[in-house]
Image (cartoon, rainbow, N blue to C red):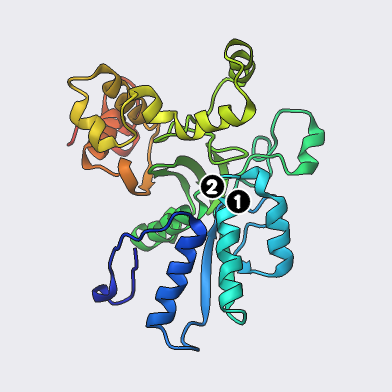
């Protein structure tokens, strides 16, 4: 997908690439075909995990890339490909400025529950802590809130929700994150399309004994076979689940669980897209937030079941 300032330049095209390396080469070929030498002045990269050191946008250096290689155990599903992309661009365009924008940019500030994980403290020195992901999406939402409702609103108490294939919630006060639903990796928090979200840690030991499941298989299960897909056993696509919920109790349970995660909020600003960005879900969220009993949005004078 390509998006430009001129909408006429926007287009989507499928390419035959067997792996990320081939896809990167096709991308750079496309750039060289359409942009004259010297016109491309910088490339920005979304990097999911920057560990305890990197969170603010900054220029990519060889030292940073080396440290990102060391951080791959934090996020083996995203970081290797993101590093590959930066290295490929450096090889093809050695003088090009590259900037990393980290998705942990809105991680919770150190506080009572902000970052500490309640396991032996020695792991904190290894970078094991609670991180907040989807920070780039949240930064955009906060800018939009300030633009639409004014700077004072953005300095208040705000709940942000990024609802897509990956989903998370963040609590913001005075423009700063004070809590997040995610933890060490993007797999934690609320249930998502194929990710489980938070689980009882005893489940690892149970499955290791009952099914001899390995750490690798457990990681694959909670990241790619769980969430909406795991509950419904048919699809991670909310459009499909909404179409089948009246005929398939498993699809109905998956939809209900996804909607329940916002039922307990007073006010929520939603962002994100993907398979869960559906008008039916937005209406369902509204009904859940305004349904009696419970205060929900009553404090704002909102009482009806608007659809």
The residue that appears at 46% across and 34% down in the rendered structure is: 224
- Is the Cβ of the residue at disc 1 closer than 8 Å to that at disc 2? yes
Residue 248: which quarter of the image? top left
| SS of the residue under disc 2 | loop
Q: Nearer the viewer, residue 70 or 124?
A: 70
Image location of residue 36, percent across then percent down: 43, 88
* Residue where numbered disc 2 is placed: 133
* Label 2 CA crowd tier, 10 Å (few <14, some 14–19, many 20+): many
**Residue at screen point 51% across, 42% down:** 171
Can you identify the residue that label 1 sits on? 49
Report whether residue 278 is seen: yes
Whole-percent x and y of residue 30? 40, 74
| Rendered image quadrant of residue 306 | top left
Count neighbours of disc 1 (C-alpha within 10 A) and say few if under 14, some if 14 to 19, many if 20 or more: many
Question: Could you tell me residue 210's position as x and y percent?
Answer: 59, 10
Foreground tag (1 vs 2): 1
Question: Who comes first in sequence, dot 1 or dot 2?
Answer: 1
């Amino acid at each position: 997908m390509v998006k430009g300032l001129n909408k006429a330049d926007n287009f989507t095209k499928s390419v035959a690439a067997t792996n990320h390396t081939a896809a990167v080469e096709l991308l750079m070929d496309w750039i060289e075909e359409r942009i004259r030498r010297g016109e491309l002045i910088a490339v920005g990269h979304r990097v999911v995990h920057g560990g305890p050191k990197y969170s603010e946008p900054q220029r990519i250096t060889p030292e940073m890339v080396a440290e990102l290689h060391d951080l791959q155990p934090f996020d083996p599903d995203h970081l290797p490909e993101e590093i590959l992309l930066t290295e490929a661009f450096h090889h093809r365009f050695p003088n090009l400025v590259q900037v990393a924008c980290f998705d942990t940019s809105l991680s919770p500030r150190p506080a009572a529950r902000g970052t500490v994980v309640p396991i032996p403290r020695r792991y904190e020195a290894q970078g094991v802590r609670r991180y907040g992901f989807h920070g780039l999406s949240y930064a955009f939402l906060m800018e939009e809130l300030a633009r639409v409702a004014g700077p004072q609103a953005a300095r208040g108490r705000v709940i942000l929700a990024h609802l897509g294939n990956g989903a998370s919630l963040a609590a913001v006060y005075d423009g700063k994150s004070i809590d997040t639903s995610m933890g060490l990796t993007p797999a934690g928090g609320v249930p998502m399309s194929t990710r489980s979200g938070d689980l009882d840690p005893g489940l690892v030991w149970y499955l290791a004994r009952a099914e001899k499941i390995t750490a690798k298989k457990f990681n694959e299960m909670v990241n790619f076979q769980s969430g909406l897909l795991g509950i419904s056993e048919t699809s991670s696509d909310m459009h499909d689940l909404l179409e089948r919920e009246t005929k398939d109790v498993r699809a109905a349970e998956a939809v209900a669980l996804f909607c329940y995660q916002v039922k307990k909020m007073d006010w929520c600003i939603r962002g994100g897209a993907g398979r869960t960005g559906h008008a039916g879900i937005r209406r369902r969220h509204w009904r859940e937030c305004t349904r009696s009993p419970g205060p929900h949005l009553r404090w704002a004078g909102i009482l009806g079941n608007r659809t």
